[in-house]
Image (spheres, rainbow, N blue to C red):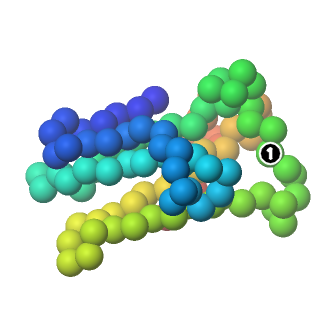
Amino acid sequence: TNFIQSGGNMDFNIKTDATSPQEGSYINMQGTVNWDWLIGLLDFNATAYNETTLPLSDNASNLYFNALVYGEAGLSNSLVLFRFDEDENEDGTFDGASEDQFQK
C-alpha cells in the first residue's frame, strides 16, 4: 500500500547518489503539505520481495530498522510515524485483534 499526498512538489522516488548513507540508494520522501501532516505512506510488504513473510531474525539483537529523518528547520509540523505490524501466525496478513503493532 502506498499513498502520496497531491501537490507540494512531492517526490517519492528511489535515489542513487553519493548522499546515500548505505548501499548507494535510498527512498526519498519529500514535499511540503501545509494542510495536513501526512505527506505520504509506504508499506513494505513481504510480497514485494516475493516472500509470504519477511525472513527476519528471531533474535532481537540481530534485528534493526535504520532510517535517516531530516525535517525542515523551523517547521513545527515535521512529523514521522513509524508503524510495525507483526504477523505472528504467519498467514500473510495483520490482524489487529490478535497480533501486535508497534508505532512511535
Question: What residue is rendered at 88% in x and 58% in y?
Answer: 59
Q: Which residue is mark 1?
A: 56
Q: Nearer the viewer, residue 26 or 100?
A: 26
73 relative position to 84: left or right: left
Question: What residue is rendered at 53% in x and 45% in y?
Answer: 16
Question: What x and y, as percent, mark residue 74?
Answer: 21, 78
| Quadrant of res 40 | top left
Q: Where is 52 relative to 94, above or below?
A: above
Q: Nearer the viewer, residue 20 or 92?
A: 20
57 relative position to 30: left or right: right
User: Most extreme residue toward the front, as rendered?
Assistant: 18
Q: Amino acid at mark 1?
A: Leu
In the structure shown, which secondary structural element does the residue marked by tag 1 occupy? loop
Q: Nearer the viewer, residue 31 or 64?
A: 31
Question: What x and y, as percent, mark residue 55?
Answer: 81, 38
Q: Where is 18 relative to 44, above or below?
A: below
Q: Can residue 100 be seen at all in this image of the molecule?
A: no
Question: What x and y, as percent, mark residue 3?
Answer: 34, 34
32 relative position to 57: left or right: left
